[in-house]
Amino acid sequence: MSGSEASLHRDANFLVDVPRQILALTKKNFILAYRNRTATFLRVFSSFFFILLIFLVNEALKGRFAADPYYKDYPNPPRTVLDGIPDCTRQASNDNQCYIFGYTPAPDLSGGGYHPDKDYASVSDFVSGTSAVCQAADCEEMYRVHQVVRKIMQQNTINQQAHVIAASSVVGFRNQSTLDDFLFNNPTKINGAYVFSSPNTQAVNFVLQLNSTSFSTRGVWNRPYLDLGLPMQAMAHKAIGSFLNVADNIEIGRQLFAHPAFAVSTFEGTVAPLFLLGCAMFPFVIQMSEVVME
């Protein structure tokens, strides 16, 4: 047999033997896979279980943010009447006592805080009842602030229902520096504080100091300004209006700015395509590697 004939014979054998070997290996692997059906099932469908897990986690995260107005379509947001000041939350404080709000000035003689638990008919009754040590003008201002604070406590509402704030949940300090020292030493003990000033009987001003520390409740983060700052401002304006006899029934509301729904961006949603590619690729690569090694 010449060299060219031998080469043609080898090529013919190659074209016949390779498909025959591939068919034999495929049949053998099919028989082995059929005999070990559990392992085959796990190998084939394990990728689908991972994909399902990623899908469920991503849907859970999207559902978690579903109630957030940021992720809702608001072409015409409704107006909601502002509620009163919410109860205090201990947050990370180790102390069992927390205050709904603090304020200044107050007849605080000890420096530990004054609790406005009583109404007084006049300045003299206020001075004698609280043992306040102050100049005449300061006592008059302190008395006007005391009346405003008592109105805030008595007119407070929760879910549009009367919710009077107890005196033990309100603390007053003599001046702003004493209040600042208390807030610095007790960062989670007071939700917010008023710094009042009343230069005369026709004017009551205030500055709001807000505890803007965010905290999570069952995975939902609070919004200090909306949940606490606006209600404190609204209740102060209502109390001042009532005190000055300029408005007996003030209704203050808020309305979200109209916006489309923003997409929820999650880590699982970002990496899911890579996991999908990997889950689809690895079983095929492993199976082909076994065939090549045989």
Image (tube, rainbow, N blue to C red):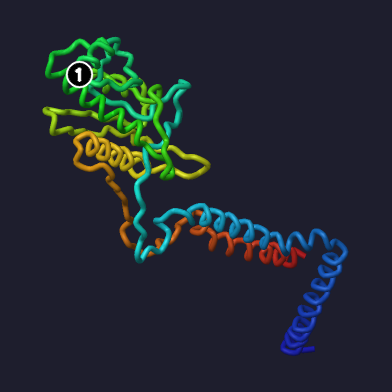
How many numbered discs?
Answer: 1
The x, y position of residue 46, in whole percent, is 70, 59
Quadrant of the frame with the N terminus: bottom right
The x, y position of residue 18, in whole percent, is 76, 78
Quadrant of the frame with the C terminus: bottom right
At 29% across and 48% down in the image, what residue appears? 252
- Give the residue at the far right of this rendering: 35
Is residue 256 found left or right of 275 in the rendered image? Answer: left
At 49% across and 56% down in the image, what residue appears? 66
Q: In which quarter of the image is residue 70?
A: bottom left
At 63% across and 65% down in the image, what residue appears? 280
Q: Which residue in the structure is indicated by mark 1?
A: 123
The x, y position of residue 99, in whole percent, is 39, 26
Near mark 1 (Cα within 10 A), the count class, few <14, some 14-19 or many ≥20, is some
Residue nearest the viewer, comparing 290 with 61: 61
Secondary structure beneath disc 1? helix
- Give the residue at the far front of this rendering: 121
Residue nearest the viewer, comparing 37 with 50: 50
User: Which three-letter amino acid code belongs to the residue tagged 1?
Assistant: Val
Q: Quadrant of residue 76?
A: bottom left
The x, y position of residue 187, in whole percent, is 36, 26
Residue nearest the viewer, comparing 3 with 7: 7
At 37% across and 40% down in the image, what residue appears? 84
Is residue 234 found left or right of 24 in the rendered image? Answer: left
Q: Is residue 249 above or below residue 264?
A: above
Q: In which quarter of the image is residue 11?
A: bottom right
Q: Is residue 16 above or below residue 261?
A: below
Is residue 227 found left or right of 25 in the rendered image? Answer: left
Residue nearest the viewer, comparing 67 with 265: 67
Q: Is residue 69 above or below residue 24?
A: above
